[in-house]
Amino acid sequence: MPSYNWQTVPPSLSSRRILGIAICVWVAVPLPARTEQEQPVRVAILFRAQKSYQMATSSLEAAIQRTGYECICIELPKRDDQPGRERALRQLASAEPSVIATTGADVTSFVLEKVPKTPVVFFMVPNARDASFVTDGNPHRNRVAGVTTDVSPEDQIDWIARLRPATRNLAILHSSRTQRTVEAFRAAGRKRGITITTIEADKNEFPKASEALNTKGCNGVLMIPDARIYNAATIKRLLLWGIRQKKPVWTFSASIVRAGAFAGQYADSQAIGRQAAELIQNEINGTRPSDLGLQYPRHVGRAVNERSAEMIDVTLSDAVTGVGTTRFGGQP
């Protein structure tokens, strides 16, 4: 705005006249109407207070705030707290978000069922191929996209083939809740000439699965995060099987590699949060959720256990494992 020296105003213009001109100008130029684009863009994050979700949720919230959008975090109580869930839904409705982000499969299914039309971006969903909301024919399929915690089957099979080129038959224990995930591994294995042998298992009858591993001629086992199969006891049993049989156990968690698995690949929770924020940005910019679909994590961690490798007679080298691979079980 230009600066005026009021001493240069001609004497013929009295102060009253100047004020009148100013009022006329103000009346003649109405304030512009508030456009739809100027309405605040709100993103609601509906989350469960679980430790595994905390880092990803915090990372997503920070990324959303950096865009300048309003971010509202709402905790969804457990299923047995119906009054609490109703309060969360009221909070969600009053926020009128443009996009809802959800942690895990249960929260995502709940939101899709209770909140119509609003686009949903999920994150931190394991075995996402088996989630009902990403399957063809699901009524909510066209308004949901997201990032799974699974490392893509192609990347996992590729790393296994590089670390253990002799692998020709790889076993995967699964349940009815991970059938589509296993099929994705079958397809990835075929591309690398590796047979994926599937064994249906249950944590309550795990010895049967262990016995089946002994009869299938597999070169190792690839674990997938299936809660119907794995708990502390069954994981320990499988790791002991690998050492006794001198066969590698590949896993989805650095902590399980530390506990004795041969090697594993796993997603970075904070990176998943940032990747989910990108999906939200794309949706706000007009990309349809169905065009974004299910995405695998772009940032993947890797770990090997040197002690376990020694016990099953596998030689590891930096050239094979790759730069940045975490190593456990080595000499102090």
Image (tube, rainbow, N blue to C red):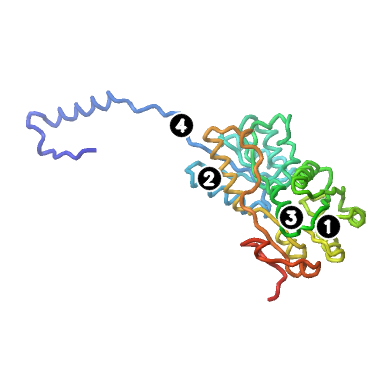
Choose the circle earlier in sequence order: 2 or 1.
2
Where's residue 20, x and y in %? 19, 26
Identify the secondary structure beneath mark 2. helix
Q: Which residue is mark 4?
A: 37
Q: Which residue is mark 2?
A: 64
Where's residue 248, x and y in %? 80, 61
Q: Which residue is mark 3?
A: 161
The CA distance from mark 2 to mark 1 is: 45 Å
**Residue sitting farthest toward the top:** 28
Identify the secondary structure beneath mark 1. loop
**Residue in the foreground of this view, choosing between 226 and 187:** 187
Q: Which residue is mark 1?
A: 219
- The image quadrant that residue 247 belongs to is bottom right
Identify the secondary structure beneath mark 3. helix
Give the amino acid type for the residue marked by disc 1 in the picture. Answer: Asn
The CA distance from mark 2 to mark 4 is: 18 Å
